[in-house]
Image (cartoon, coloured by chain):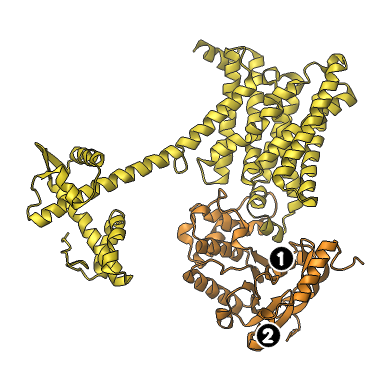
Amino acid sequence: MIQQVENPALEIHDLTVSYDKKPVLWGVDLTIPTGALCGIIGPNGAGKSTLIKSIMDLIPLNSGYVKLFDKELDEVRKKISYVPQRESVDWDFPASVLDVVTMGRYAQLGLFKRPRRADKDAAMSALEMVGMEKYAKRQIAQLSGGQQQRVFLARALTQNAEIYFLDEPFAGVDAATEKAIIQILKKLSAEGKTIVVVHHDLQSVETYFDWVILLNLRLIGSGPTTEVFTPQLLEETYGGKLTLLSEVGDLVKKGGFHAREKQ
Amino acid sequence: METLIEFFSFEYPNIKYVVFGTILLSISSAVVGCFTFIKKKSLVGDVVSHAVLPGICISFLASGSKDPFLLIVGAFVSGWISIIVMDAIIKNTKLKEDAATGLSLSVFFGIGILLMTYIQHSGNASQSGLDTFLFGKAAALVGMDLLAFSIIAVMVLIVVFIFYKEFKLISFDPQFAKVIGLPIQRLEVLLTSITVLAVVTGIQAVGVVLMAAMLITPAAAARFWTNRLSKMLLISSVFGAFSGISGAFISYSTPSMPTGPWMVMILSIIALFSFFFAPGRGIVINQWRRFKIQSQLLEENLLKAFFKIGESSGNFFMEVEANDLRLVRTFSSGQLSRGLRKLSTNGYVEKAGNSWKLSIEGHDKGKRITRLHRLWELYLTKYLRIAPDHVHEDADTIEHVITPELERRLEKLLDYPTSDPHQSAIPTR
């Protein structure tokens, strides 16, 4: 069940990606409507983070292309916001909470320019949105996991983007933080922003998302939650692992082939 | 003292130049070193500093002169190649970063030593002094050399100043930097280039072997004193500058003392001092804090014991023998004498012959601790549903932590209770 839409916010066409030479995503082809609050669901190692990273051009594609608002990534970077996994950075870095949130404004600032008063103001109001304004002066190492995640979200909010990509924002955070984050995401979605979230917990999918992407090395479903989040498709996503597919992947890696022959 | 005045009056222009040069070189490597340090690439400085040696030698062999600009170009190129080789090893082989680092360092240094030995035995008249690159020659930093290296040091500092914000972001979160469209590839090349340049110039002062210390030590020491990158850069350069001045001064006052190694010595002393005494992160400070808490716990536990004896006897100001306190709670005899002595200095107990008795303040404090203990026990049984016989140990810790504000909230929450889960009365405030 893969539903395509007209004038999508995100279009992924025939995407194949390898990680360490092993193909981890095969021929993904999907579209997401503008304003969707979309969850990417799938078991561990299904390629969920890989999908987001390849949309963000952080890993090279073997084949296919990605378009955002019908444009190349480079043309619309200012409309895009990315929240990496919390563990992807060293939180012992010498910076305050405000420093990190202000980094969201660097793109608007451009090279050479120092953050201005207005950028600090934007950072402060983003911190207020996530309920962290009291911690602005704290060193980031002194934050809990949930607080770190809120800081990352605040940094993304300062960008005033049109589409947000969040990589596992609910991993290892407390219940209060999870609730605060989903409320903010719902509000953004109501304002017409498109949100794409890598998500783990099946329990909350139906209440959180109005669009769902089911992924396990290949695309299994993409469409409105009510139509895609069905026992059958979930069974297909989580149940019978396609052992053939992953074995072929291993062979590709071992043989040093390219997942797609170069044209 | 006279030497000190003589030194700082800069009577001899040579001293002025040497001091100026060493300070500039130290600051530029200290500032760049901060980025190397926070990117966890500390060993890269070591690799580069060893790897510039072949470049210097080849440059000399090719040109036959010791023109500092030519030598710098050679050093810069071979320093860069060593980094490329290191990255290529990590990317294309199964070797990990540590092995690649070691490999790159030793191979390049080996080639450098080989070439240098060849040059020394070739009888080239102008070769004398080339080996100063091995151990540095800060004291001879004059003329063209000084000019060349100062220009580069200033350039390095200007680049850091201009690209501070970008360097900070690519050091903290390169993925995010890439997504928001920063040219991270080019910024990385720029940062590596100024690192190599800082190393090339710093070698003038301390030589290849000690260069890594010039790069990393000020940054590592500064990290102890601050949690902000901007302040870290500042503190690090102050440390660098200080080591430059002191190194130059020591070698001036005692001619047999070399400048470079002394600079590294001073830096090491600063780093050690920071390691032990810096507020927040220093070991001694942390130990001291722990000691203070231990003695606070002991005092409060003793007062609680006094109070308990008072409770059962009905007379809170009764004279109590030290050993009687042990019937209420275990104290070692060392703890007893130490704690009681401290309490009497603080005016919480008074000594009467062989016995001790509470002062009014001691009584009040003992009462408060007992009160907090019982309030917390009640809170645990009521709100955490913990069995009454399991709450004591926990309350023994928490009683020392609760602030007056929390105490009031706790009271209110429990609706001003009068007895704890074990039916002991909760003393009123």
* Chain that bears disc 2: A
The answer to whether B265 is drawn above or below residue B33 in the figure is above
Q: Please say if B426 is above or below B28.
A: below
Q: Which residue is mark 1?
A: A53
The picture places residue B375, in percent across and down from the top left corner, at 24, 63
Q: Amino acid at mark 1?
A: Lys
Left or right of B84 on screen, residue B256:
left
Q: Chain of mark 1?
A: A
**Residue A102 image position (x, y, % from top left):** 58, 57
- Furthest residue to the right? A263
Pinpoint residue A175: horizontal percent, then vertical percent.
48, 71
- State the mark number for residue A233: 2
Relative horizontal placement of residue A232, taking residue A135 as reference (left or right): right
Q: Which chain is orange?
A: A
Q: Tag on residue B381?
A: none
**Callout 2: helix, strand or loop?**
helix
Q: Residue at x 80, y 47 (%)?
A: B88
Query: What amino acid type should be assigned to the residue bearing mark 2?
Result: Leu
Mark 2–mark 1 Cα distance, whole angstroms, equals: 24 Å
Looking at the colours in the rendered structure, which chain would you say is drawn in yellow?
B
Which residue is painted at 57% across and 15% down in the image?
A: B7
